[in-house]
Image (cartoon, rainbow, N blue to C red):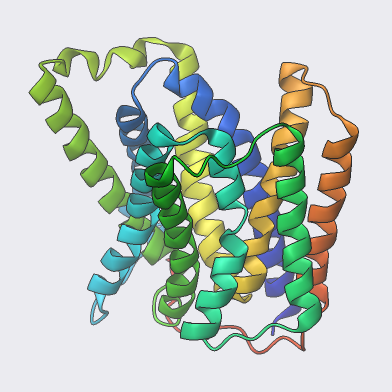
Amino acid sequence: MNPSGLTLAYLCAVMNALIMGFSFLFTKIALEFAEPLDTLTFRFAASFAVMSVPVLLGRVRLNYRGKKLRKVLLLATLYPLGFFTLQSYGLQHATSGEGGILFAFTPVLTVLLAFLFLKETTTLPQKLSICLSVGGVLFIIIMKGSGIDWSNMKGIILLFLSCLAVAGYSVFARRLLKSFSPAEITYVMLGIAFLCFLAASLAGHATAGTLDRLFAPLASGSFIAAILYLGILSTLVTALSSNYALSRIEASKMSVFSNLSTIVSIAAGALLLGEEVRTYHIAGSALIIAGVMGTNLLGKKSKRHVPNTNRAKAG
């Protein structure tokens, strides 16, 4: 294992949590001007367009010749297509608090799937650390007064499936990174997501006779700023960095970093919205950090990272 490559992988994982923590604020801003499906369309349009520039200029070289591209298409159905679709419909029947509770269990699902499909094993201290991190998130959410209303079974099932889609993506992506570079996987994912969400958005507006409203949000500078953050940072950068991290560290170790976004959301709310930080926020954050550190420090000696002889070359 190249120490510098491993360090960069962990930095990417932490950066993802930071970006995702602020994404909730920008999503709220975007949804003030556009419907969820339109927001997703513009979000992935921005990310795909930005990545297409260095690809077309030859600065990032992609090589799909002789590779099983259908596997990357299948990966895209898990994330972003599966995750965002299931989450959007799930939140129509459940609360955001219920979504946060269920999403906290994503690292647990990832550990199970990584064991079944990648034969990744975790030590008992690692398992306890993952539970500690999940417990920190649950503690914060429950102390805020959120819980699960089991009468909303349709929404709960859809939200659970969205978490399963993310866990499946982490596991499947790690396997595909043996033959694809992070850039090659990311570019196909973004392109497929953009085309699918655009088609769905156009169909919806055409049916409702509201095609003129599709581009109306672009008249707002706040909407454009939110979309640029969500599309470039929260989609493109996180996709590239997470795929890079998954090529070098186990899926089970990578997944637990997602819980750090809860801490970032708390800090963002306090700094930008003036929200109060309570004692339970601090206690829960401490549990999350301890869990993330335990998961990544208390395991067995790391094995050699996933070999990849097809890295994207920069010209």
* Residue 155 image position (x, y, % from top left): 41, 42
Picture layout, residue 274 above or below residue 43: above
Front in this rendered view, residue 154 or 85: 154
In this orientation, does residue 156 appear? yes
* Residue 23 image position (x, y, % from top left): 57, 35
Left or right of residue 269: residue 66: left
- Quarter where residue 143 is shown: top right
Taking the spot 69% from the left edge, 35% from the top edge, the residue there is 265
Count the numbered circles shown.
Answer: 0
Picture layout, residue 85 above or below residue 178: above
In this orientation, does residue 53 appear? no
Considering the image in quadrants, where does the N terminus appear? bottom right
* Residue 12 image position (x, y, % from top left): 65, 58
* Residue 282 image position (x, y, % from top left): 88, 40
Considering the image in quadrants, where does the C terminus appear? bottom left
Left or right of residue 44: residue 236: right
- Quarter where residue 40 is shown: top left
Taking the spot 56% from the left edge, 51% from the top edge, the residue there is 103
In the rendered image, the residue lying farthest to the front is 151
Taking the spot 33% from the left edge, 59% from the top edge, the residue there is 76
Taking the spot 51% from the left edge, 64% from the top edge, the residue there is 243
